[in-house]
Amino acid sequence: MTATIVYDPLIPVSLLIVVAIIALLGLILAILRGLNGWPLRGLAAAVVLGALANPSYQQEDRAPLSDIVLLIEDESASQRLGERPDQTKQAADTLAAQITARPNTELRRISVPDGAGDAGTQIMTAITDALAEEPRARIAGILAISDGRVHDGDLPIDLPAPMHLVITGKETDWDRRLTVRNAPAFAIIGEAVTLTLRIDDLGAAPEDQELAPLDISIDGEPPQTFRVPIGQDLELPITLPHGGRNVIRFSLPVAEGELTDRNNAAVIQMNGVRDRLSVLLVSGEPHPGGRTWRNLLKSDSSVDLVHFTILRPPEKQDGVPVNELSLIAFPTRELFMEKIEDFDLIIFDRYQRRGILPALYLDNVAQYVRKGGAVLVAAGPDFASADSIYRSPLGAVIPATPTARVLEDPYSPAVTELGERHPVTTNLPGNGDWGRWLRQIDVAEPQGNVVMEGIDGRPLLVLNRVDEGRVALLASDHAWLWSRGYEGGGPQLEILRRLAHWMMKEPELEEESLTANAEGQSMRITRRTLGETVPPVTITAPDGSVTELPLLEGAAGVFEGNYQGPEIGLYRLDNGDQSTVIGLGPSAPREFVETIASGDALDPVVTSLRGGIARIEEGVPRLRNVRIGRPAAGRGWLGITPRGAYETRDIRQTAILPGWLVLLLSVALITVAWLREGRR
């Protein structure tokens, strides 16, 4: 039970002050006029002012409340290194026992796991959330058990009680860290791109180590090992082997005594792009379709096009002297012998044997295909003639045999059942409602994949792989009708664009492929195939565990599945003869960027709250009471501030100047003053 005097003025305080000033002026006037009753008048004014101030005698019935101490236990990934889990448990249990043994004190134990995604350790966020659920007046202190590597230490916090940090780990801990400082997202195939790496030894590292072995692996291939300096930025040139995504893994072997190997590896993913695609287009004669090919290839700014049209074959005899012709001589030897390897794609558009390209040159083109080159044959009536390019050494790689028939009946090109699954012809605009073509070259014995058909189901577009290279045969020279809008036209540019990019081995147009796209810790796996079914995909996790995931068919020829990776790192996917690798999570997890225990991140917060930092290695500190505003830490001890909070159960107020007493006193004093002055 406590008692106090409280004031609850009957009128606003400002008005009460005005009344007091008026009373004071009246009292001064009475003194100046020599009225001997002025003291009684002053007392009467004081009684009235006191009544207006309304003083009351207040009695409260209070119940004391217990103090609350928050015990924060860091359970993030970095806290699971070395002996830290045992240290944390021992310190938490010891401090909890000390807190519960204190009179009138409650304990709140709060565990802090890894932050969502790669947010790291969010201790200050956890404290803020806990304070929002507790009365601030009862918080007597905060004890955080952690390695000190928090990632929200700049979060503002206002506490009336001290905060302390109890650090896990040992002074002798050391760790080796690999960091990728600079890694571009794209690089040009065949050109070196420079990455910046750095290897650092943190903590009490051995002083006799100046070089460290670094393993580098691309797309899961066997790694190459280099010895690199420690503590210096390393400029490393990397040449991407292929287009599309390239997964590069850098790793360091575990050193003796090292705290963890979780930051000894980094995975980056770079997309390989072609700088310029070099295409050689050879048109056997002028015709409307020649401009179609030229417009398609010239519209792509990334294509360097070399186009030759044979306007005057050698057998032409019109009597015009050669030195008077303005035509450019066809540099056959330079193109087909010396620089053929410089081209990514060679297109023969209605070309026939006229003695311009000797058999040796065409045989060189066939060898170019077998070594990884690409040739597209756009056939016209010449393909069915005796001078057909098929009847040359190049015929060994052409995927179909001409029957010498030229069919000139109108027909609508159609995608075959196999073509519906092939990326070159799947989901073409118009859904097959296209204009007709008027000519087709009859071919037989197709090799590879027939993705489009024409008259009576005859092969129209045939795609084939020859050793390392690719060959395509378009058995018609009337694709240009679609570009002119004949009978509504069709997706001529889209087909020719896809065809050209498939032949140049663009990854997104591979008919047999296994890809995966990562978002956070999950990946979406896509298997494209020409087959009807695919087996489950085998997923090998960074720790070596193997999981089989069934894939479900969505679009034609596309099977997909989702997988949630249990940990950050490099995953290998295998499905039939297809395999790929993908990295989940950041290249360097935030929890393992800094692994040596330190109180630097929380020192500003702890210092501002007059708290202290202690190491478990030196013993679990004792707890003692300190007053508000006093230093709350010392050698071997940490302070808790008792709050003395209470709950008010009942309040009673009694007026000191009741109305009848005020009236009696004021009337009596004024009357006595009047009588005294009147007697004078």
Image: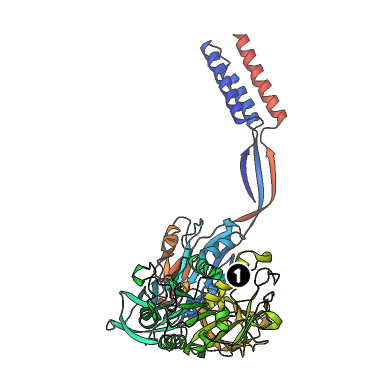
Q: Which of 439 and 371 lies nearest the eye of the viewer? A: 439
Q: Amino acid at mark 1?
A: Gln
Q: Which of 292 and 211 lies nearest the eye of the viewer? A: 292
Q: Which of 626 and 196 lies nearest the eye of the viewer? A: 196
User: At x 58% / y 59%, what residue is drawn?
Assistant: 138
Say which element carries label 1.
Answer: helix
Q: Is residue 354 above or below residue 2?
A: below
Where residue 24 appears, as percent x and y from the top left, is 55, 20
Where residue 238 appears, as percent x and y from the top left, is 37, 78
Q: Is residue 586 above or below residue 39?
A: below
Q: Quadrant of residue 313?
A: bottom left
Q: Give the crowd class for mark 1: few <14, some 14-19, many >=20 residues within 10 Å.
A: some
Residue 387 visible, this angle: yes
The answer to whether 458 appears left or right of 365 in the picture is right
Where residue 393 appears, as percent x and y from the top left, is 47, 90
User: At x 60% / y 59%, what residue is drawn?
Assistant: 132
Residue carrying label 1: 492
Residue 571 visible, this angle: no
Q: Which of 411 and 151 lies nearest the eye of the viewer? A: 411
Colour theme: rainbow
